[in-house]
Image (cartoon, coloured by chain):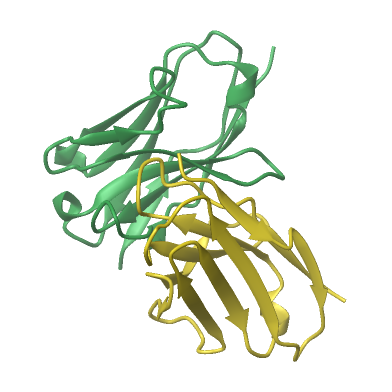
Amino acid sequence: DIQMTQSPSSLSASVGDRVTITCRASQSISNYLNWYQQKPGKAPNLLIYAASSLQSGVPSRFSGSGSGTDFTLTISSLQPEDFATYYCQQSYSLPRNFGQGTNLEIK
Amino acid sequence: EVQLVQSGVEVKKPGESLKISCQCSGYNFASYWIGWVRQVPGKGLEWMVIINPGDSDTRYNPSLQGQVTISVDKSISTVYLQWNSLKASDTAIYYCARQYHVVQPFDYWGQGTLVTVSS
């Protein structure tokens, strides 16, 4: 199985900050990397697919980059509605494991 | 409008059986894989299994194979997840979600079904 490791596990930031979350795969997954946002009591919501493609309807302040084993999700200017938990997921091989999540909190 | 509507909250005892559902609408049901993702309350996401409604091709997480069964009823655009003998460790929220291809992400999700297994 491919293991996905996110860092940090939690992060405190302020509205307007630029934030970066990292995801590392235990082996190369090319660009088969997705990012989801989950708010309390809600299902996850797809933000980024294929490492850097923005899902339709997602604000442009979200961006993704990386390939191989190292990936990043960047939020260019945090908005109040962005405080949530973020998960990466590989879709290169089965099982399609998720990272452990990054909890983004208000400072 | 694409919708994945899941069945309601379940409270079961250890050893009991259970089948939860995910009814899909607003798109060509046979053209998208449907998967199940588990989340223990307060914890992360676990990928469980996916099925192709068109031909019933299934892919299980090896860690879960034999513990759950996925199935589909194309006549009512519904995918099921079934347990024959529940354990307390099956307590979780179960989400269904769709993907266009096995290497694609989950782009639409159901609202989740909370399953509680307790004696």
Q: Which residue is drawn at 68% across and 18% down?
A: B118
Q: Quadrant of residue A41?
A: bottom right
Residue A2 in the image: state x and y as whole percent: 47, 45
* Nearer-the-camera pick, B26 or A45: A45
Q: In which quarter of the image is the C terminus of chain A?
A: bottom right
Residue A75 in the image: state x and y as whole percent: 62, 83
Which tint is chain A? yellow
Q: Residue at x 53, y 46 (%)?
A: A3
Q: Which residue lies furthest to the right in this view?
A: A107
Q: In this view, does B63 lie to the left or right of B75?
A: right
What chain is the green one?
Answer: B
Name above or below for residue A20 compared with residue B30.
below
Q: Which residue is drawn at 35% across and 47% down?
A: A93
Q: Is residue A30 left or right of residue A24?
A: left
Q: In which quarter of the image is the N terminus of chain A?
A: top left
Residue A34 in the image: state x and y as whole percent: 45, 64
* Nearer-the-camera pick, B18 or A16: A16
Q: Residue furthest top?
A: B15
Name above or below for residue A47 compared with residue B118.
below
Residue B66 in the image: state x and y as whole percent: 39, 17
Q: Quadrant of residue A13?
A: bottom right
